[in-house]
Image: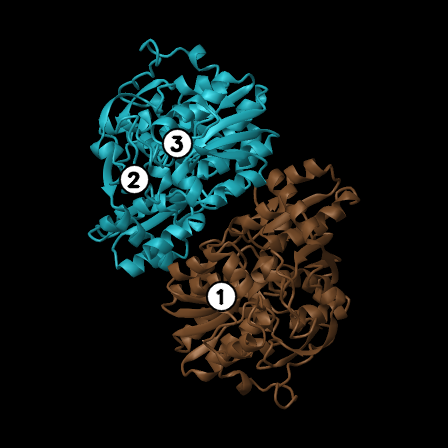
Chain colours: A brown, B cyan
């Protein structure tokens, strides 16, 4: 397998193999030295630690994971013909729609893989954090498929505003706590200093990591940011490449994906960037983030912690600071202070651009999209839609625009209601 | 086109062409005489009235409707391999999953068609009723695609318990009222006699029909029961037949579909019954209804009104009486007092069986299904799942079971939470 792209990928694609300069390593939070694989063993199974540092170009997807993927993959690539007519654009617009997964987003692509590798190594319980709840629900789903359970710390703002995701986790047999909680040292310390905090992913990560690191037989799973998570999501972009080719498009002219921790964006765009680097294509790639949490467009590129308590490795990334608490915007999945190191590296190398989108523009675009295409996009995804719509107004004749529609907005309807 | 079944149907299949005995006609509510097409003109466009009485075997699907269908159709037919292993059954189980539609259920299949025919004849506004809200949201979606709006009366029990569907209608630019409402004569009369009523589909239909019948330029749309609705849904079964054949199954041994007004059931099973009648297959077909609203298994087969106020034509159907108010069960889509005349006729002719399922058994089956297959079924669909699971326990080796999974349960998670 040498070319990137298949409608039913047998391998994940690893952009680390094709980066013109190597990715800066993660550093140990205590020593500041490059992280050793054994440093991660309290948290992750060996197979995922190996993927985290791998520079293999293709990594085989286990058969059991592909069996589950096949329940809803390949996800549809849809020509937005009705949207094109509504806009009167000269461009051809396609969207890759991850909302058909049982969790309604792209998150199960890595949740299934992470749960399976953990199950293979004997772990029966996972901890994690979640923002809007899409990741927590996805990991709960994945755990239920491999006879495991998980314990989820959900950012308080979303926990209180969006109870449906918690119910979803419970249907899958898992549990969900509001974060910060009284259940962990990290949570108690935060609550003591700021009892009214709306919470943040950084805080929730501290809680989930603490429990995994201090409990025998319990591992931790992260829904974004880390290299192995980006890797697992590349099924999205590989399918999209093959589906576009089947529609007669050798490569898209420009790709828009929303950026929170980076996993949906990486999943869609890394195979396309990989083709730019190795197959001579020239697709522009644009990360779309909220102006309320402008990690790439306003953050610094430096080593920072992934969490508030400084328990995680230090990662070289675009960051607003580990203690940054974003406003309680509706796109809960885009409220992380940092950005995937691989995405940050791609930006620094000029392989990817970034724009910030206001919440107002994002929802307006979501409504336009829903009324033309029928699908109500997740608030996260509307950031990519808004940037794509702005671009489409002046697009060249026949230009091909690809939008990553990372999820549906069915459980975010109160946010739309608030906007209307 | 002479055989039934295609992965991308170009025609709807009309079981009325193959019934061994003709379907009893609808009667005028005033005269008691067979209904004439012109009696329906205040409510429906001519094309739908023609379909209502058609005995043509195949009716072409308009190009514009097929363009919208293609956004999510063919819907997936999924082998429930993980569920089979969890049950330890000797059967092969497949499910046809309509939850991938933008509304999360099978309802858009007819909503798109009805909106398009109305738009073609110049109607710019529709009225309708809805139970759980899936139909109202689907019609709102369809209207938004053809530059129309709709006004929806939602059964009060669901309106209060499930606000997300109303938000969904609003995103699509439509409006939704709690029924009974003060906006209609029918609604005011019901509220005067029973201010605390939880509402019923029969009441909501009276309100929507009244407004359409008394307002120039406004038509009415029904989400189930009528012949043209059954017709539009047959894309489900035709796809399923072709998808099963592609999987090496000439015909399923037994098919389970949930039955409220009958449209999802008819859509899945009429093409299969049609093959039994004309192509020599021998698939058993089982309608699965709630014990709380046991229309087929406990109702009488006689002429009755479709609504409480007696505004609709009289239909020969299984009925619990037009004034029957079912308990506020979670499966809001199965709370109708009557049954599609075509489904009722099929039962009377011995072409279809029926069973009643308790809410308890239905939710338990839904949880089992979710934890094995990942998808959380709509509470309506869990009735079919429960009956299928009970059958699978003693199934013959290799027996093929087909389940109609009419929708996902994402917006019904509070119901699951209440069950857990």
Look at discs 2 and 3 and give the one toward the viewer. Answer: 2
Q: Which residue is mark 3?
A: B4
What kind of element bears circle 1? helix
Look at discs 1 and 2 and give the one toward the viewer. Answer: 2
Estimate how packed mark 1 is, as few (under 14), some (14 to 19) or many (20 or more) residues with alpha carbons within 10 Å: many
Estimate the x, y position of residue B213 in percent, counting from the top left.
48, 17
Disc 1 chain ID: A
Look at discs 1 and 3 and give the one toward the viewer. Answer: 1
In the rendered view, does B32 fall on the left or right side of A24?
left
In the rendered view, does A4 fall on the left or right side of A211?
right
Q: Which residue is mark 1?
A: A111
Tell me whether the residue at label 1 lies in contact with that at label 2, contact meaning CB atoms closer than 8 angstroms: no
Q: Which mark is residue B217?
A: none
> Marks 1 and 3, how far apart in space?
40 Å
Is A209 above or below relative to B400? below
What kind of element bears circle 2? loop
């Amino acid at each position: 397998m040498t070319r990137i792209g298949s409608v039913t990928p047998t391998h994940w694609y690893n952009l680390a193999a094709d980066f013109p300069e190597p990715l800066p390593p993660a550093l140990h939070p205590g020593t500041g030295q490059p992280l050793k694989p054994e440093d991660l063993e309290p948290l992750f199974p060996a197979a995922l630690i190996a993927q985290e540092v791998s520079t293999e170009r293709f990594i085989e997807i286990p058969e059991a994971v592909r069996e589950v993927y096949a329940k809803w993959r390949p996800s549809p690539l849809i020509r937005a013909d009705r949207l094109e007519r509504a806009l009167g654009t000269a461009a051809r617009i396609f969207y890759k729609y991850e909302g058909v997964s049982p969790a309604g987003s792209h998150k199960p692509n890595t949740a299934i893989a992470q749960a399976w590798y953990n199950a293979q190594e004997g772990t029966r319980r996972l901890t994690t954090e979640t923002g809007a709840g899409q990741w927590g629900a996805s990991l709960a789903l994945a755990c239920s498929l491999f006879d495991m359970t998980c314990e989820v710390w959900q950012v308080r703002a979303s926990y209180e505003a969006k109870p449906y995701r918690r119910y979803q986790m419970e249907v899958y047999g898992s549990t969900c706590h509001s974060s910060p909680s009284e259940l962990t040292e990290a949570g108690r310390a935060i609550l003591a200093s700021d009892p009214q905090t709306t919470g943040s992913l950084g805080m929730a990560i501290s809680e989930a990591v603490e429990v995994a690191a201090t409990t025998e037989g319990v591992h931790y799973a992260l829904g974004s940011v880390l290299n192995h998570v980006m890797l697992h999501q590349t099924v999205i972009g590989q399918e999209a490449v093959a589906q576009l080719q089947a529609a007669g498009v050798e490569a898209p002219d420009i790709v828009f994906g929303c950026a929170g921790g980076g996993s949906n964006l990486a999943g869609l765009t890394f195979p396309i960037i990989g083709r730019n680097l190795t197959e001579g294509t020239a697709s522009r790639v644009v990360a779309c983030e909220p102006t309320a949490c402008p990690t790439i467009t306003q953050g610094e590129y430096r080593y920072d912690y992934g969490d508030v308590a400084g328990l995680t490795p230090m990662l070289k990334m675009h960051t607003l600071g580990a203690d940054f608490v974003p406003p309680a915007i509706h796109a809960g999945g885009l409220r992380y202070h940092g950005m995937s190191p691989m995405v940050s590296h791609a930006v620094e190398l000029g392989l990817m651009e970034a724009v910030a989108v206001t919440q107002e523009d994002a929802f307006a675009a979501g409504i336009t999209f829903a009324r033309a295409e029928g699908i109500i996009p997740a608030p996260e995804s509307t950031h990519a839609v808004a940037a794509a719509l702005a671009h489409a107004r002046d697009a060249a004749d026949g230009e091909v625009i690809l939008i990553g529609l990372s999820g549906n907005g069915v459980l975010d309807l109160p946010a739309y209601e608030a906007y209307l």
